[in-house]
Amino acid sequence: MTFNTILTEFLAIAGLHIIAVASPGPDFAIILKQSIRYGKTTGFYTAAGIGSGIFLHIVYTLLGFSLLIQEYDWAYTSLKIIGGGFLVFIGYKSVLAKPINLSFSVSESKVSNNFKAFKIGFLVNALNVKATLFFLSVYTAVVSTETPLQWQITYGIWMALATFLWFAFLASILGNYRFRNKITQYSHWIERISGVILILVGLKLLFDF
């Protein structure tokens, strides 16, 4: 393949990915919840988890596992149940959110909870069945079978990095202390709304409506 062909392919993938990552969904809802309640540091770690979840999608797509998910109903159904159930669980906890004590929540955003924030972000993205279908579609419809493996991996690295940068940017805004200080009295309602969004997305996955 020529470099121009690869560049055209990359630009097409990048464009589709930007549209997908900017669309409101479970990733956005969890960033909103984490950043407003715990601050931008926790938001950054959550964003890193979301970005890392992209690598999982890339790996099983390149290995062909995504074709199994598409072909076998039990595999697709299992993924929907696990992913949908997890989103409902996280959403339920968010709906029970109480008003924020900023001095307490800021201290909670230190190292002790960084790994937990990363794990939540990773799981929300990794168990997102829509992300699974997105990467399956992209690597089936856009990426040529003649594209060298190293370039396919490069595409994946770019999408993971772009995802992290986008959600880290959102976290820096939503988790800014001045911003949080201004909306403290409403923040638990925002978190509850994000929880409702997560629950609705989870239920949609579970019942496919």
Image: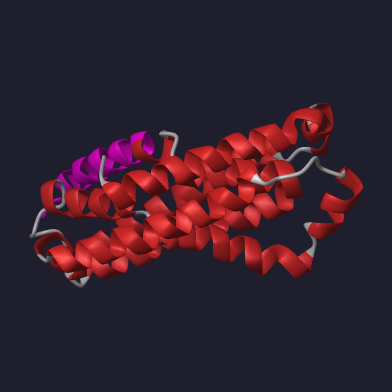
Point out residue 139 in the picture as x, y percentages from the top left corner.
Answer: 18, 54
On screen, residue 144 versus residue 57, left or right, reads left
* Residue plotted at (31% across, 54% down): 129
Residue 161 picture location, percent across and down? 46, 53
Q: Is 59 left, or right, of 25 in this rendering?
A: left
| Left or right of residue 35: residue 98 | right
Residue 57 in view in this figure: yes
Q: 149 or 181: nearer the eye?
A: 181
The structure residue drawn at horizontal position 41% and vertical position 41%, both measured from the top left corner, is 21
- Whether 209 is drawn above or below 46: the answer is above
For this view, does 45 lie left or right of residue 106?
Answer: left
- The dominant secondary structure in magenta is helix
Nearer-the-camera pick, 177 or 205: 205
Picture quadrant of residue 194: top right
- Residue range (magenta): 1-19
On the image, the x and y values in percent for residue 198 come to 49, 44
Residue 51 in view, yes or no: no
Q: Nearer the viewer, residue 149 or 84?
A: 84
Report the residue at 48% width, 52% height from top: 88
- Residue at coordinates 47% horizontally, 45% vertically from top-left? 199
Which is nearer the eye, 201 or 92?
92
Q: How is the image coloured?
A: secondary structure
| Quarter placement of the N terminus | bottom left
